[in-house]
Image (cartoon, grey):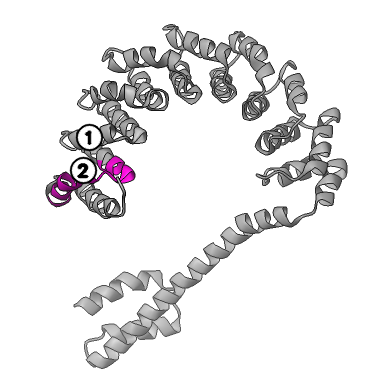
Amino acid sequence: HSQLAGIKRILPKIKKNKYTMVLSDISIKKNRSAANQKSALNILFYLDLTAKMRLYIIVVFYLIVLYIFPCYRSFSLSEEYYIDLLKYGTDLDIVSAFSRINDDLGEKVNKNVLAVFKEKHSEKVYHIIVKYVGTAEIKGAANILLDELVKENLGDNYKEGLINSVGLLKISGSFNILKDIYGQKRTTKRIKLSIINAYGKIGNKSIEETLLKILKNEDEDVDLRARAILNLGELGTNESKDLLKEILLNTYEEKILRMYAASSLSKIGKDSVLETLAAVIDDKSHEVAEYAVNSIAEIGSNQAGDILIDALRSDYDKVRYYAVIGLSKIKYKKATDILKFKAEYDTNETVRNEAKKALDNIKTGTN
């Protein structure tokens, strides 16, 4: 019976030919000996495995050709190639080549990269070059990017790329331009989000005040206010700490704002915000509680470890899960006993498994 079950499973997958048909006939007919049936079945299983291996080889080869080879080729090409490409290549050639570049190609190439903005190309070329400028952090590109940014009728793709690169290069002189674009009626939500992200990367006193203004404006889109919270965390200054605490503890506030407030507080206040984060571990919103536990783990102090131990008694499975992950991350030896209990008796299988891993990890710790 087990042999017949195996045959029924694999026969539909094997390409039918005269050999497989004969083998299947031998393996199924009752008048055949058990040895013959077993031999035929083994061969069929071998054919099934061979077919799968061929498929795997084809898939791997396809991935190499599609992804790995182009990347290898892009790294192996010389500076002269990229210089000539920028001088003589088509727009499609330039877009194709630079879409695969994630590293600085060198000063000589970069000089020619910046010269592209003096020539006439499609917006796709400018977009991919702007992306490269930000990734490679090309010095001397600031004025070019700002000149491009103030041009009229830019597509959102290109404008977003410019703003992202302005942020990556931390161009402080871009603040007034970005603020002006943000305030324009025609500016889309997508562009506003990219501006807020750039603010977080650039970081100065004026930018912090602007982010706080966005956050405090209850008429502003909630996603924009949430993004402002995240970038206040990136700035890492204390001025926003009290406001973020207030948002986190306000159960009537938008859930996403409270979640992001928990995340940013861990970057701003360290131990000084632990009491506030601990207060929402049993919050009615399990998402807020999960973010709080993650933030406590990020702080990673002994006080944080004690709070994570308490979090292991939460009714929320994910809160216990993240508490285990946090204790494992900081290798908090004081948690050994409760983790042993959780590894054996927690009602959630994932928590039990992670508790076992945490115990192994803590054995190597120094805390």
- The secondary structure that most of the magenta stretch takes on is helix
Q: Is residue 248 above or below residue 323?
A: above
Q: Residue 244 location in percent, x, y?
A: 37, 16
Q: Is residue 177 above or below residue 327?
A: above
The amino acid pointed to by label 2 is: Lys
Residue at the (79%, 41%) spot, across then down = 107
Lateral position of residue 333 relative to residue 17, left or right: left
The amino acid pointed to by label 1 is: Asp
Q: Residue 46 location in percent, x, y?
A: 39, 80
Name the residue nearer the viewer: 37 or 108: 108
Q: How many marks?
A: 2
Residue position for label 2:
334
**Which stretch appears magenta?**
324-344
**Residue 329 is covered by the magenta coloring:** yes
Residue position for label 1:
306
Secondary structure under tag 1 reads helix
Q: Is residue 110 above or below residue 218?
A: below
Lateral position of residue 228 relative to residue 124, left or right: left
